[in-house]
Amino acid sequence: MELKFQENFLWGAATSGPQTEGRFKKQHDNVFDYDFDHYQERFWGGIGPDTTSNFFNDFREDIKLMKAAGLKSIRTSIQWSRLIDDLEKNTVNEKAVDFYNAVINEFIAQGIRPMINLNHFDLPVELLKTYGGWESRHVVDLYAGFAAKCFAEFSDRVSDWFTFNEPMVVVECAYLLGFHYPDMVDGKKAVQVAYHLQLASSLAIEQYRKINKNPEGRIGIILNLTPSYPATEKIEDLKAAEIADLWQNRLFLDASIKGEFPEELVSLLQEENVLWQSEAEDLKRIKENKVDLLGVNYYHPSRVQEPEYSSDSLAQDWRPDKYYASFNKRGVRMNADRGWEIHPQTIYEIAKRIQEDYGNVPWFISENGMGVENEERFKDEEGQIQDDYRIIFTTEHLFWLHKAIQEGSNCFGYHVWTPIDCWSWRNSYKNRYGLISLNIHTQVKTLKKSAYWYKNLTDSSLLQV
Ligand code: BGP
């Protein structure tokens, strides 16, 4: 069977500055690249974010390869820690401006539409050390200033902007799971950080509406949506799924698209005495600065059940996940070693929800991809990685996306994670997601079988299923 996607469907791939550029000539370190003493234990193989595809130096070559893999659009990010010289005075570094200008111009010259994201987990480390990072209102204001500089410099040529990638990952990984810097487990701080990230997104949009130079321009946010499925139909499990959904999905979805936090969540946080601190005009500014479009990163659903904690431990240590316990379903296919269940049909459910509950706002899949360990074992005699599993994975997800579009979903594109194998936040190069393989020792980059397949798909917009 052959499925046709609409004319102008935006095919592409996503990546980020911190995972590709390398540490060359940066003004500041970000929270991931400063801690050299701890590389060995922190990152897989002791390999830190200074080992990349060297996009900073080799971007022209990389963009050619992306074109060969069929990309018509790309999402990457500008690093705050590279663009800004003086973080308090918010002065731009001219060499960094030249670099990002050259990158944007090269994408355009190669026929690849650049979509720019302003934050991909990469806070300048001084702001964490001095102010506690996103716990601080001052950092929110500094971020809005940085965003304003980006719009002033680049919005004449870039028409799609995003304020954040996966703010919930920052909240959960840094403040609930102790997995990203500052490696904390503190529910109350997690709530404050979530609020500040939403506010920062809205204040960046406020700047955009004043500064944008492009009549076609639009701005949105990228959210990782993990629809939560209850273990059973028991009322306790249903309740657990509802609260997980409120926290993991609706907090940023509602605030970004409707301009309001979900009432049920606000009441719950109030009852627990952990509601965020805010200033008088904040809610008005959030209401007035809704997104124009939404990016959805989809990897896996979440499965939850009633938690088993005792009421004593709940009282002492408030955390949003005290209301639900996550579990992995047994006997299903997993993405990489992440315990991420492969469940393509969830894409269809996400599309329906956006259509029914969020006014069918324009949206696209901004990340979807399959991570695989030790892909070298799939090389053929010519040295090409035969990643048929990735082709199958992508086909299955696109099948469900196509069905949703046929039924009226306002989805305008699909981005694979990622064009070239890239560094990742803790796993480094353990799981490879790229259409193009990277040898980190020789810097040789080779198109995988999936890259040729993707080019056929993106040239024709015809999916063979
Ligand atoms: C998303 C991030 C990406 C990327 C991807 C794959 O959450 O936006 O930056 O890392 O996940 O995850 P990982 O590299 O951790 O396997």
Image (spheres, grey):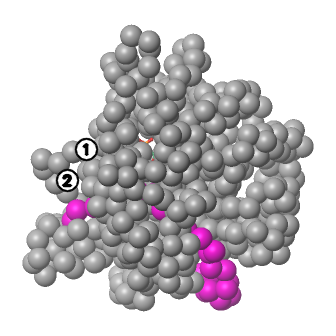
Q: Position of residue 198 (x, y in %)?
A: 57, 71
Closest to the observer, 321 or 357? 357
Residue of label 1: 334
**Residue 136 in which image quadrant:** bottom right
Give the vertical position of 192 relative to 392 (above or below): below
Residue 103 located left or right of residue 418: right
Amino acid bearing label 2: Asn
**Position of 435 relative to 383 (above/below):** below
Left or right: 115 as drawn, with respect to 462 = right
Closer to us: 137 or 6: 6
Q: Is residue 134 in the magenta section?
A: no
Q: Which mark is residue 328?
A: 2
Front residue (pair 45, 252) = 252
How far across and how far down the image is residue 443, in percent?
Answer: 59, 18
Disc ID at residue 373 = none
Numbered range of the magenta stretch:
275-304
Q: Is residue 409 above or below residue 8?
A: below
Image position, residue 200 (x, y; %): 64, 69
Q: Please name which of the two marks, 1 or 2, marks the residue nearer to the observer.
A: 1
Q: Is residue 394 visible?
A: yes
Q: Are marks 1 and 2 in contact (CB under 8 Å)?
A: yes
**Is 280 colored magenta in this rendering?**
yes
Q: CA distance from mark 1 to mark 2?
A: 10 Å
Badge 1: few (under 14), some or many (20 or more) residues near its Cα, within 10 Å? some
Q: Secondary structure at mark 1?
A: strand
Residue found at x 39% / y 75%: 407
What residue do we see at 67% from left, 54% from top? Answer: 115
> Which element type, helix, strand or loop, lies under badge 2?
loop
Identified at 77% across, 75% down, the residue is 209
The image position of residue 175, as x and y in percent, is 44, 58
Label 2, residues with CA under 10 Å away: few <14, some 14-19, many ≥20: some
Say what amino acid the circle numbered 1 marks.
Met
